[in-house]
Image (cartoon, grey):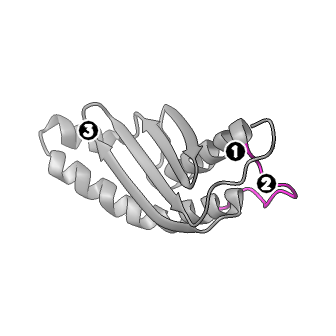
């Protein structure tokens, strides 16, 4: 996945949240064939959380409707392993920090996913953020 070029001055506050959201949605779209219908990101100190809604593909929805929730979770886990490096690279580019840990999980009902990044230091902020 291509990330946004490293800005001359790192983004902060709402602009950083928006850029993180776009990068994560783009990765989901490229890897799953569709992105979530709603997404938002926020950070506090050295933690970034991205919430995604309505992420399941049509095939995952079919599996869920047939009661194959384990299969949906397995597919999502494998997809996350494939996307992980791209997501980490995007976060590192956007924040200027190193991702020390990356975690991801999802639920079927409701159709929600979360991407969580723990950084090596607090996200740099500028005055007024």
**Figure check: 50 above or below 1:** above
In this view, the residue in front, 52 or 117, is 117
On screen, residue 83 versus residue 72, left or right, reads: right
On screen, residue 103 versus residue 91, left or right, reads: left
Report if the CB atoms under discs 2 and 3 are less than 8 Å apart.
no
**Figure check: 44 above or below 65:** below
x and y percentages locating residue 44 in the rendered image: 56, 45
Report if the CB atoms under discs 2 and 1 are less than 8 Å apart.
yes
Looking at the rendering, the stretch of residues picked out in magenta corresponds to 1-12
Q: Residue at x 11, y 40 (%)?
A: 67
Label 2: which residue? 10
Q: What element carries label 2?
A: loop
Q: What element carries label 3?
A: loop
On screen, residue 17 versus residue 53, left or right, reads: right
Magenta: main secondary structure equals loop
Q: What element carries label 1?
A: helix
x and y percentages locating residue 86 in the rendered image: 56, 64
The crowd level at tag 1 (other Cα within 10 Å; few <14, some 14-19, many 20+) is many
Image quadrant assignment for residue 104: bottom left
Magenta highlight on residue 5 = yes
Label 3: which residue? 108
Label 1: which residue? 16
**Figure check: 89 above or below 43:** below
Mark with earlier residue (2, 3) = 2
Residue ranking furthest to the right: 8
Mark with earlier residue (2, 1) = 2
Note whether residue 1 is visible: no
Q: For the N terminus, give its image quadrant.
A: bottom right
Q: Which residue is drawn at 41% across and 45% down?
A: 114
In this view, the residue in front, 80 or 15, is 15
Alpha-carbon span between mark 2 and mark 3: 35 Å
């Amino acid at each position: 996945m291509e990330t946004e070029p490293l800005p001359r001055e790192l983004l902060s506050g709402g602009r950083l949240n928006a850029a993180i959201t776009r990068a994560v949605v783009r990765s989901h779209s490229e890897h799953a064939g569709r992105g979530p219908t709603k997404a938002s990101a926020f950070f506090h100190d050295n933690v970034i959380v991205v919430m995604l809604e309505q992420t399941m593909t049509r095939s995952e929805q079919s599996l869920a409707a047939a009661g194959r929730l384990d299969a949906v979770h397995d597919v999502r886990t494998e997809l996350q392993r494939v996307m992980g490096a791209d997501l980490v690279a995007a976060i590192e580019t956007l924040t200027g920090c190193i991702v020390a840990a990356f975690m991801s999980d999802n639920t079927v009902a409701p159709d929600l996913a979360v991407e969580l990044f723990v950084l090596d230091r607090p996200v740099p902020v500028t005055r007024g953020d």
